Amino acid sequence: GDSVTQTEGLVTLTEGLPVMLNCTYQTIYSNPFLFWYVQHLNESPRLLLKSFTDNKRTEHQGFHATLHKSSSSFHLQKSSAQLSDSALYYCALSDRNNAGAKLTFGGGTRLTVRP
Amino acid sequence: EAAVTQSPRNKVAVTGGKVTLSCNQTNNHNNMYWYRQDTGHGLRLIHYSYGAGSTEKGDIPDGYKASRPSQENFSLILELATPSQTSVYFCASGDGDWGDAEQFFGPGTRLTVL
């Protein structure tokens, strides 16, 4: 079945430094949709950004990600971390033709940004 | 504003007892989902539904049942609760029927089974 791998469980950064959270996936489908969801402390997950188009950069709220089907990756990046970016980040996978729109989530990366 | 609500927000249950977690959405979305969240495992899909009267097994359905009596309501039922079911449970609704749909999550229910 489908799977999503987030290699870092915990990432700690100093404010102002760049952010990169890794996400790779495995799927039998040729038209994957990739998502990043973010969950701040004591809140529920919410969508940060999503992409379907190969090699096209998607941006939202200062974050960006590019779907690379050749390497099955969808890494999340930001040029300069802010304290408010501290949160749990989930990468998730679906398929264009996935009736029911089910998501397969990775294990999550907890980002902590220090002053 | 459209929303997903869950009740109860916190629940302590005894091993072998029955637990029902409730979810209500005002988004008028067809699809609804139940996940559990555990450190290191992320969000794992337990059951989902395409609409009123339908329930489907997700990735980890064992020990759980689901009920979708109406468009708005989706319940998760633990007939015989076990300590391994101690977790945070999230309900979500999806704004489309296909793979690009965004899911909107409720506030979560923290369940402790003693």
Image: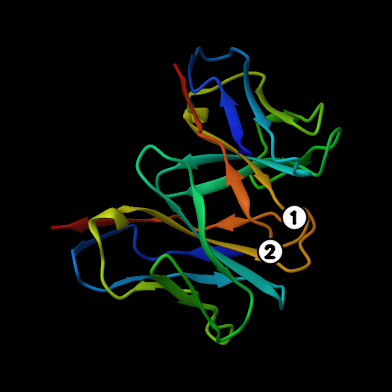
Q: Position of residue A55 (x, y in %)?
A: 55, 87
The subunit carrying tag 1 is B
Q: Amino acid at mark 2?
A: Asp
Residue placed at 49% from the left, 23% from the top?
B9
Q: Is residue A76 above or below residue B2?
A: below
Q: Is residue A19 left or right of residue A65?
A: left
Most foreground residue, A63 or A5: A63
The subunit carrying tag 2 is B
Q: Position of residue A57 (x, y in %)?
A: 50, 81
Q: Looking at this rendering, what residue extends furthest in the front direction?
A: B1
The quarter of the image holding the N terminus of chain B is: top right
Q: Is residue B92 above or below residue A86?
A: above
The numbered mark at residue B100 is 2
Q: Is residue A21 left or right of residue B75?
A: left
Q: Quadrant of residue B7?
A: top right
Q: Quadrant of residue B64?
A: top right
Most foreground residue, A34 or A59: A59
Q: Amino acid at mark 1?
A: Gly
Q: Are marks 1 and 2 in contact (CB under 8 Å)?
A: yes
Q: Position of residue A31 (x, y in %)?
A: 71, 76
- The residue tagged 1 is B96
Q: Quadrant of residue A41?
A: top left
- How far apart are labels 1 and 2 at the CA level? 7 Å
Residue placed at 59% from the left, 83% from the top?
A69
